[in-house]
Image: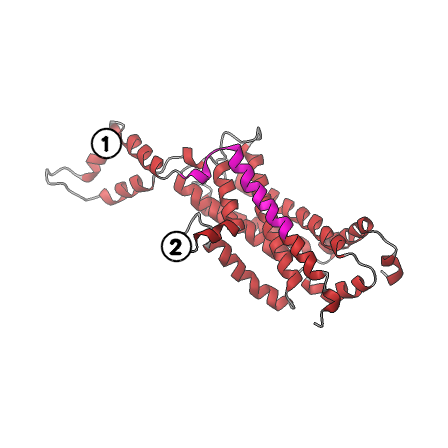
Amino acid sequence: MNELDLKHIGRFRQVGIYLGKFFRMFIYQSDWKVLPMAAIIAGLVALVTASGTFVTMEGTKTGTFAITCVCIWNGFFNSIQSIVRERPIIKREHRAGLHITSYVAAHMVYQLFLCTLQCLIMMLVYYLSNMVFPAEGLLGLPSQVVIFITLLLITYSADMMALMVSAIVRTTTTAMTVMPFLLILQLVFSGGFFSLPESVSGLSNLMVSKWGMAGLCIAGNYNSLPSVLIWNKLVGMSAGVMLPDDSSMTQVLAAIQKTGGRDVFINWISESNMEAQYAFSNAGLLEAWGIMALFAVTFAFIAVVFLEFIDKDKR
């Protein structure tokens, strides 16, 4: 594309031109490889978490944490090099009339396409893994649709974060160095799986991972699920344990279960493990969705701001 072409092309037409470029890269430069990678990672996670996710409290928290990790990894990998690898080209074309907003908008549309395909693949993998999806959905939608939208927002907001980093850093090496650090930051400060000191707990509100887990746990009706971890531990530890009256711990637990005491115990534990942020409500779900969407828009805006100064870049 020559200088005259860009100078006389409006913003919307430039979006279309760059979208065409990105889709050609998807086909001819193997950008499609992110799709089988998404399937493999989702399959590995489903192998160890599918049986408990949306079935028990413990299984749901572990499963949604792992699923959120997959989404964030997919999003990061999609775009962490997408801008920095063609920085000299952007600089030259910006001087020739490229609108940075058009360029970033084209990336946003293209990355949304990639994220949608990845999340559809993930849902298919979880379906084939016999994951038990919640019987009831929110916002009048089937639970599978609610979960798909949540996965898409997690992946896309992580994708836009990586796009922002790609617009800021100097080299692809730096971009790939920053990515693992960001991933660890998202996972450690998710606030849903690791206990955080009070002094830094507020940082979790700035993490995509927190709102992603919240959205998935809300969609999975976390607070209505049983908490079976302690009971199962008791059963596992009871073998061979004898009480002073010569009865075995196994017999005692069996008697408790026979009289309905197990359900009472599990309900009591479950009530103590309920979390207000995971309440099954439209408002809570929309809050999680809205914050992740806001993250995505904010990251894209920051990318535009940094790229607007690319002409002054001496790199």
Looking at the image, residue 143 lies above or below residue 72: above
Crowding around mark 2 (Cα neighbors within 10 Å: few <14, some 14 to 19, many 20+) is: few
Residue 314: name its quadrant. Answer: bottom right
**Dominant secondary structure of the residues highlighted in magenta in the image:** helix
Disc 2 on helix, strand or loop? loop
Q: Which residues are magenta?
A: 275-298
As drawn, is 146 to the left or to the right of 189? right
Mark toward the start of the polypeptide (2 vs 1): 2
What's the residue type where badge 1 is placed?
Ile
Looking at the image, residue 111 lies above or below residue 228: below
Q: Residue at x 47, y 47 (%)?
A: 65
Query: Does the magenta portion include 297?
Result: yes
Looking at the image, residue 223 lies above or below residue 182: above
Crowding around mark 1 (Cα neighbors within 10 Å: few <14, some 14 to 19, many 20+) is: some
As drawn, is 226 to the left or to the right of 145? left
Q: Nearer the viewer, mark 2 or mark 1?
A: 2
> Residue 235 location in percent, x, y?
27, 40
> Residue 218 location in percent, x, y?
49, 37
Report which residue position mark 2 lands on: 197
In the picture as drawn, the residue positioned furthest to the left comes out as 245
Disc 1 on helix, strand or loop? helix
In this figure, what is the number of numbered marks? 2
Q: Residue at x 11, y 39 (%)?
A: 246
Residue 148: name its quadrant. Answer: top right
What's the residue type where badge 2 is placed?
Pro
Mark number for residue 256? 1
**Quarter of the C terminus within the rendering:** bottom right
In the foreground, 303 or 107: 303
In the foreground, 139 or 287: 287
- Could you tell me if residue 251 is visible in this image? yes
**Quarter of the N terminus within the rendering:** bottom right
